[in-house]
């Protein structure tokens, strides 16, 4: 199979040349482009998530040999969650190589966090199936770079931490409200307010509703802990 120019360029960016290029094509094919003769990347995404998990678990154990399971778990979650995968995908311009259906392309699919995160996991699986665990591991370690060393000791999701703070004080779980939504449909901007029933609130803005909620929760935690 002959690869297109954009997929050849992607191979160089990830440092792996496929002996089975059809795996790379499948990894970048979104379900909106699937057909009876064209597989999408969903099954690869499932496998890639597990390969990434093993690589990150090994890396964290090697990075801090004295850390407890309770310390390692939130760091692990921070490194494998969809936002981390999407950030790496952006760094290697994975969105430029995605094969999307017309509707997904028109709605800005090349920049969507969930879609990029899924494709990154699929790409990891494609390398694993093409060459085995060690090359896949080397690619992940290279692309994730210093993230393992920089991951926060308490890397829990801010929304989870805020909910635990509220429950420990007998408060209801925090709520999240869309204050405003601006920008075109393919590149929306959300302003989210995180609120507690004691009257405390904080707001944050992001192009992803989920990330805006997390940022608002983090901002509110900062207020409460200061």
Image (cartoon, rainbow, N blue to C red):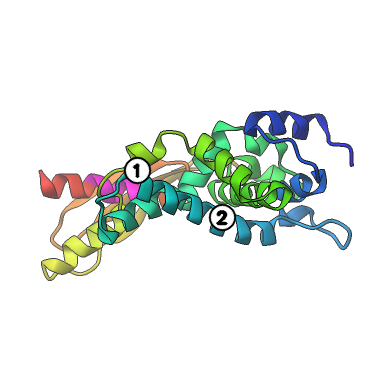
Q: Earlier in the sequence, mark 1 or mark 2?
A: 2
Query: Magenta region, mostly helix, strand or loop?
Result: helix
Q: Which residues are magenta?
A: 214-219
- The residue identified by callout 1 is 63
In the image shown, does 60 or 203 lie closer to the viewer? 60
In the image shown, does 169 or 92 lie closer to the viewer? 92
Mark 1 touching mark 2, by CB under 8 A?
A: no
Task: Examine the structure image and report whether residue 81 is included in the region drawn in magenta.
Answer: no
Dot 2: what SS? Answer: helix
Distance between mark 1 and mark 2 Cα atoms: 18 Å
- The residue identified by callout 2 is 51
Q: Residue 128's spot in the image, x, y percent?
A: 66, 50
Task: Examine the structure image and report whether residue 216 is included in the region drawn in magenta.
Answer: yes
Residue at 53% x, 36% y: name it.
143
Q: Is residue 179 visible?
A: no
Is disc 1 surrounded by few (<14), some (14 to 19) or many (20+) residues within 10 Å?
few
Q: Residue 170's spot in the image, x, y percent?
A: 12, 71
Residue at 36% x, 50% y: name it.
61
Dot 1: what SS? Answer: helix
Instruction: Name the image quarter holding the C terminus.
Output: top left
Q: Residue 70's spot in the image, x, y percent?
A: 26, 60
Q: Is residue 175 visible?
A: yes
Residue at 40% x, 38% y: name it.
147
Quarter location, residue 215: top left
Quarter location, residue 93: top right
């Amino acid at each position: 199979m002959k690869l297109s120019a954009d997929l050849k360029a992607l191979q160089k960016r990830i440092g792996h040349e496929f002996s089975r290029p059809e795996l790379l094509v499948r990894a970048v094919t979104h379900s909106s482009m699937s057909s009876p003769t064209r597989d999408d990347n969903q099954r690869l995404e499932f496998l890639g998530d597990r390969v990434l998990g093993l690589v990150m678990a090994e890396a964290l154990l090697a990075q801090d040999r004295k850390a407890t399971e309770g310390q390692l778990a939130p760091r692990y979650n921070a490194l494998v969650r969809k936002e981390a995968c999407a950030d790496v995908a952006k760094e290697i311009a994975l969105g430029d190589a995605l094969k999307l259906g017309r509707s997904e392309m028109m709605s800005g699919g090349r920049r969507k966090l969930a879609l990029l995160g899924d494709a990154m996991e699929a790409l990891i699986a494609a390398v694993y199936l093409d060459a085995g665990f060690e090359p896949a591991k080397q690619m992940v370690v290279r692309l994730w770079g210093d993230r393992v060393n920089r991951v926060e000791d308490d890397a829990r999701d801010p929304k989870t931490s805020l909910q635990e703070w509220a429950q420990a004080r007998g408060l209801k779980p925090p709520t999240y409200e869309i204050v405003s939504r601006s920008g075109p449909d393919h590149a929306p901007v959300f302003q989210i307010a995180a609120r507690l029933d004691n009257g405390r609130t904080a707001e944050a803005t992001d192009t992803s509703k989920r990330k805006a909620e997390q940022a608002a929760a983090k901002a509110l935690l900062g207020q409460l802990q200061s």
